Image: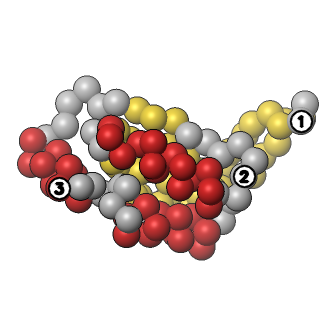
Amino acid sequence: MRIVLSTHSALEPARALARAAVETRLAACVNILDGALSVYRWNDAVEEAREVLLVVKTSADRLPELERLWRERHGYDTPEWVVLRPADVGERYLDWLLGQTR
């Protein structure tokens, strides 16, 4: 299992990206958290923006295709793409996740 963290500028394009990932079985589930405040440096300036955080649950073997979908459909020049490897995952949840991403 892998967890991908990514942000988007607005709820509707984030929702469309999440639905595309789940519909194509590249992700089993995407949590969408609207209203995150991001503070970051861009073009030598410190910026603040309201963003939508996506928490994507997928399998390791689907990561390359999922990343390709992100590059093709995400609107940012440099979309956040942080992949986490959980230390422990419940067996039943892992079975479900792997079944949804086949």
Element at label 3: helix
46 and 70: which is toward the camera: 70
Q: Amino acid at mark 1?
A: Asn
Residue of label 3: 99
> Which residue is rendered at x = 41% and y = 51% of the image?
56
Which part of the image, by quadrant, shows the N terminus?
top left
- Counting residues from the N terminus, which is met first, the one under dot 1 or under dot 3? 1
Q: Amino acid at mark 3?
A: Gly
Distance, label 2 to label 1, CA atoms, is 14 Å
Seen in the picture, residue 96 relative to 24 is either above or below; the reply is: above
Quadrant position of residue 31: bottom left
Q: Are marks 2 and 1 in contact (CB under 8 Å)?
A: no
Q: Residue 66: x, y in percent?
A: 46, 50
Q: Is residue 56 left or right of residue 40?
A: left
Residue of label 2: 76
Distance, label 2 to label 3, CA atoms, is 31 Å
Q: Amino acid at mark 2?
A: Tyr
Q: Are marks 1 and 3 in contact (CB under 8 Å)?
A: no
Evaluate whether residue 35 shows in this view.
Answer: no
> Which residue is rendered at x = 34% and y = 30% of the image?
85
> Which residue is rendered at x = 61% and y = 69% of the image?
13
